[in-house]
Image (spheres, rainbow, N blue to C red):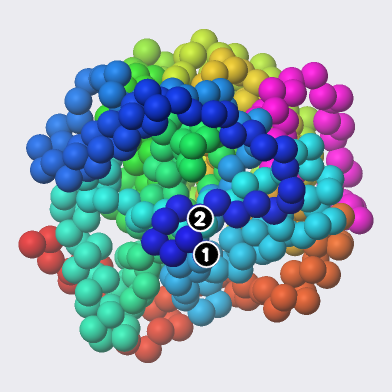
Amino acid sequence: SLSGKRALIRCRPVPAYQPAMSAEELRALEVALLAQQERLESADSAISPKKGGTPEDLAVYGDFEPILLVIYHPLCTGHYLERHPEQPGRVKAIRKVLKAPSVLDTLPSPLFFLEDFPPVTDKQLLLFHTPRHLERLRVASDRAQESGMVVVVDEDTAVMGRTLEAAELAAGGACAAVDAAMLGVDGSRYRVAFSLCRPPGHHAEPERAMGFCFFNNAGVAAQYARDTYGMERVAVVDIDVHHGNGIQAGFRDDANLFYGSTHQGDAYPFTGDPSITGVNRNILNIPLSAGDGSAVFREILEVRMAPALRRFDPDLFILSVGFDALAEDPLAGVNLASEDYAFATRILGGAVRRDVPVIALLEGGYDLRAMADAAVHVTRELCHLALGSYDEPPIPAADQQELSGDREAFGDLLSDSGESWGDSEPDLRDRIGEVYEMEDVPAD
């Protein structure tokens, strides 16, 4: 155990991909780490991000590891509301499946798990969110801890005693993925990472928590990459069934930030109109209709989204992965299959330059068995990206009416572990005896 440090857990024996470091390279790494720590501790950097990086920001000591980095933290499971769909079993289920030997044997490369990293700092959060937003969530968290009650944000979102800790780690995991690409973990840099942290973030606006989301993980990571490492252009493509109104709100006025979304147009939060194009067409909203499946989704990605991403030519690409567009998901009506998520990962990951870091962040997804299966498909494609394998056979569309044998096996695995999520229609005010309203929480 590496208590208090970033723990890198090997799931399988792997070749020793650890390039030798010269004394000069070790000194460069030390300088970079010290410089990063000083920036994080500097009050001046809290609200005024610098325009670009310096040579000391980077310690380039070798090529990227051809291995996928999976990021998870056990304390992300602390946020829990009874009978609520966004619950700890989501990330526990995916982690359990990805660590199963029967799954690992099917992947093109091993996985490295990073399961100990720091929570996001206020300085990182303030690159996307307002001070008022942070203060209101802190006050709500304090009140929830002191009273043992919850503070209701909206009809399906609430703060309980351990919510803030989990949310800070979810955003911290996204920032840790950026660090892993630029500074490295234990002497190795990882171009491709998959952050399995919750709660999700794409609905959180700069000054508002909503839709199960408290901090905007993708938005914070994007601004952190720009501020700390001088990555000028960052793209986020969101394939959650719900539109990421929070990311759009934070990106739409900055031509160096791109947000693309495929979402069910008549579903919560009822935003994402295609007429909204931002600055220099940096916003691309492509609504789906209830009942749309593989053919429509794949055509949208191939004909519109991937070309737009390629034209934008980002320095960092973030894929916000919501598994709630699967046919089995109870919260919407789009009919995708696991193979469609694999297709999205491949075509979008292949649309950016091969030296561009690719970070996948977990958003929604509420059917554990279907979500676990789709996560394995996404993980497999992320492994290919890490390996630089761009010539894999085409991914056929699946029959969405039938579960694969793998998915049935995952269901058995999750049933054995007791993972379940329960009621899909939360109504916090009816189910919790005593609550505080978020409107009652002062901003100062």
For the question of whether residue 211 can be seen, the reply is no
Q: Position of residue 106 (x, y in %)?
A: 84, 45
Helix, strand or loop under label 1:
loop
Q: Nearer the viewer, residue 419 or 304?
A: 419
Q: Along the horizontal axis of the image, is 127 left or right of 348? A: left
From the viewer's side, name the closer residue of 286 and 41. Answer: 41
Residue sitting at x 67%, y 37% = 16
Q: Is residue 188 visible?
A: yes
| Residue bearing mark 1 | 1
Q: Residue at x 42, y 16 (%)?
A: 281
- Residue pointed to by mark 2: 7
Q: Is the C-beta separation of discs 1 and 2 under 8 Å?
A: yes
Q: Which residues are magenta?
A: 377-405
Say if 7 sits above or below 67 in the image. below
Measured as percent of width and height from the top left, residue 214 is found at 36, 56
Query: What amino acid type should be assigned to the residue bearing mark 1?
Result: Ser
